[in-house]
Amino acid sequence: MIPTAERPREKLARKGPEALSEAELLALLLRTGARGRSAVELAEDLLRQLPEGAAAGFERLRRVRGVGPVRAASLTAAAELSRRVRPDPRPIVDSARTAAGLVPPAVRAARKEHFLVFCLNARRQLVHQETVSVGTLSASLVHPREVFSPAIAHASAAVIAVHNHPSGDHTPSGEDREVTRRLQRAGELLGIPLADHLVVSDGGWFSFREQGLL
């Protein structure tokens, strides 16, 4: 017999759910055992037959001895709820460092300038990323409409502009500064602010926002 302090409910209260094994978590959903077996023993039997546990599906769960349709329904509902509330996989871009980390290595090392736009929602999550222009060895010609078209299409709350310097020097040029001013003005008119403009290279990155230029 399991000591009272080590029963799943009491153990959860003392140590938190992360301290429980999968069998103990299933036992809490099962609530009681069956035919001389504790809830934990029933959960262990279930996992031996169905290693995927509650995710096995209603039909397979209800056929496990001691589970039946009522408990199978509870387990299936718990598995579906877990699937629905799992964390949103979209990254939160709340700093220049995070944005720079999302730039593909191939773009950093490219021999031509690539101009990218990161589209963010109101929670600063990345909802879309697109290369809007590929230029020459030393220049990328980009127009505000190319940057803001995907932002409008994805109902963005803000954008981050990114481009690489094939030279390896991520110091912004005079043209970079002028492009940034034009994008900033366009964003203000459209109600989709330019959150930052990054210049990246193999050696690092430059943030207009962090340098007080936005």
Image (tube, rainbow, N blue to C red):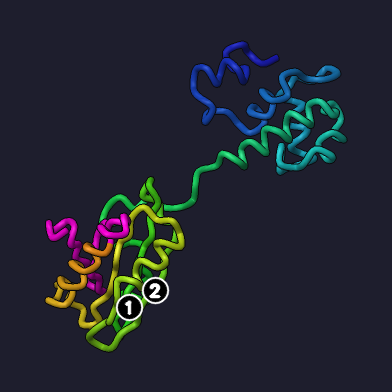
Dots 2, 1 in contact, CB < 8 A: yes
Answer with left or right where residue 6 lies relative to residue 79: left
Quadrant of the image occupied by residue 142: bottom left
Answer with left or right where residue 162 lies relative to residue 21: left
Quadrant of the image occupied by residue 116: bottom left
How far across and down, in percent of the image, does residue 59 sit? 84, 39
Query: Quick one: 82 or 173, which is closer to the camera?
Result: 173
Residue 51 forms part of the magenta stretch: no
How far across and down, in percent of the image, does residue 149 sit? 40, 68
Secondary element under disc 1, as helix, strand or loop, is strand
- Residue 53, compared with residue 156, is above or below; it is above
What is the span of residues highlighted in magenta in the rendered image? Answer: 187-214
How far across and down, in percent of the image, does residue 150 sit? 42, 66
How far across and down, in percent of the image, does residue 164 sit? 27, 75
Name the quarter where the C terminus is drawn.
bottom left
Instruction: Tell me the tag on residue 131.
Output: 2
